[in-house]
Image: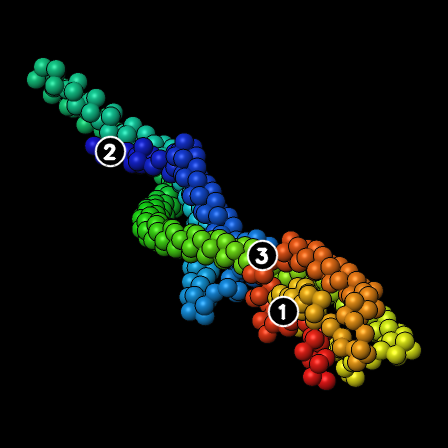
Amino acid sequence: MDRPLSLNLDSLPVNIMSENARKKYTEVFNKQNNIAENAIQSLDCLNDQIVEYIFRPRNGEISFDSDLSPKHQDTLKSSMVLIRRLLNDAQSKFRKMVEDNKKLAARIDGSINAANQEVNSLRAELLDTNKKLTEISEITETTPQQECGTKCDDEHINPKQRVDEDNEMKQLKEENCRLKAQNDILSSQENGKDINCDISKYGELKLELIQTKQELNRAKEALQAMKSDRKRLKAEKLELLNQMKQLYTTLEDKETELRDFIRNYQQKMAENDETIKQLARERENTEQEKWEIIKQARDAQERAVILRTQLESKEQHIKKLDMELSVMKEQAVKTGYTLHVPSTPPTIRCTTPNSEDLPPYETPPLSANLTHNDSSFDAQFGTPKDSRDRSNSLTPLIDSQNKSSISLPISETSSETKKKKRISLGSISKVFTRGRVRRSIAIPTGTELEGK
């Protein structure tokens, strides 16, 4: 007995990929894309910071072009360029990876949907073919079952009956054959067309089965190609992860180098600031000393002016004394006495230096030159009178001389005390290093008068 033709639809899955698997697959792709986008954003931030450090140094921050040796500048520029290249390469790789993942996910989704549609269409076609095959098998099974029933009944009959039955059967068979022939003739005439149609439908179903098998083989090949693509993508993903790790290590190394460089540069800047502050302090000290020296020079100039006025007053006083001497001489001539006075008046040497050329000096007391007792201004008279008359005649001159000699040391002592209070000889001697100039008022003594 022939078995009915039927196709096993259990081997075909309803869907190539379930919804849970598809969700997990999309979540994995989305996570990878998010990680790549975060990495791209961090790389963009690093690139922007490097560009700001190179091209736009802020006030108070690092300026890479100034206060650096050319070697440091070259190394810094080369390292920055290298870091920027690495960042650009990493960004391009990440973006390419994201685009590839998106394209691959879209392609996989499209291929999965197409495969699901093909599988569903194949299942529908196979169901139709199974229905048709079952109908054909039912038609073919009806005739052999009837023959089997007659054979089973003959076995239970006795041999006498068998002979009768055989005869009857022969007759019946002859009639049956005749009826079959007639039936066949009639059926062939009536149903010839239907049989031809059934045979042609059976051939078409076989062709459809062959086509469905070929399509199933193609779907299996597509699934194998998808699996191989998935393995290749996993390998590329691992390679990209390794490259990312290497990139992160290089970036960390460069970041540590930059931090060390910035730390050293800040230390140098702090040292430079300290040296600049020290120089500013020294400059302030020198300016203060300069102003003190200028003040001392002004004080010295003022003292020189005061001394000059004092000398002028003394010169006027000496002129007055000369006038008194001339008057006394005239009186002596009128009275008949001869007064021997030197023809040249007493020379007074006074030098008033400028404030620029004023050295530390010591003014000798005028009492040393002028206080020579009353004998320093002795006068010889050629009259035969007594010494009493001489002394009496010259008393007013001597008295005035003594008064002047007393007043001069007092003024000199007061000026010397002021000098000692005001002038610091140590600081002025640094600036004004020249020879000392002494003022002296030379008044001729009695021996000079006698010689003349």
Q: Which amino acid, by three-letter code, is at mark 3? A: Asn
Residue bearing mark 1: 359
Tell me the residue at 64%/62% (across/down).
Answer: 293
Q: Nearer the viewer, mark 1 or mark 3?
A: 1
Pair 1/2: label in front: 1
- Out of 224 and 125, give the one closest to the viewer: 224
Q: Residue at x 75, y 59 (%)?
A: 407
The residues tagged by marks 3 and 2 sit, at their Cα atoms, a distance apart of 123 Å
Above or below, comparing residue 229 to residue 373 in the picture: above
The part of the image, by quadrant, that contains residue 425 is: bottom right
Q: How is the image coloured?
A: rainbow
Q: Which mark is residue 285?
A: 3
Q: First in sequence, mark 1 or 2: give its number.
A: 2
Q: Position of residue 328 (x, y in %)?
A: 86, 73
Residue shown at 52%/56% (left/top)?
Answer: 278
**Is 92 positioned to the left or the right of 449 in the image?**
left
Residue 187, image x, y percentages: 38, 36
- Asked if the residue at tag 2 contacts the one at tag 3, i.e. Cβ–Cβ closer than 8 Å, the answer is no
Q: Are marks 1 and 3 in contact (CB under 8 Å)?
A: no
Badge 3 or badge 2: first in the primary sequence: 2
> Residues under labels 1 and 3: Cα distance?
24 Å
Relative placement, left or right, of 363 versus 339 is left
Q: Residue at x 25, y 25 (%)?
A: 146
Q: Is residue 269 visible?
A: no
Q: Position of residue 294 (x, y in %)?
A: 67, 62
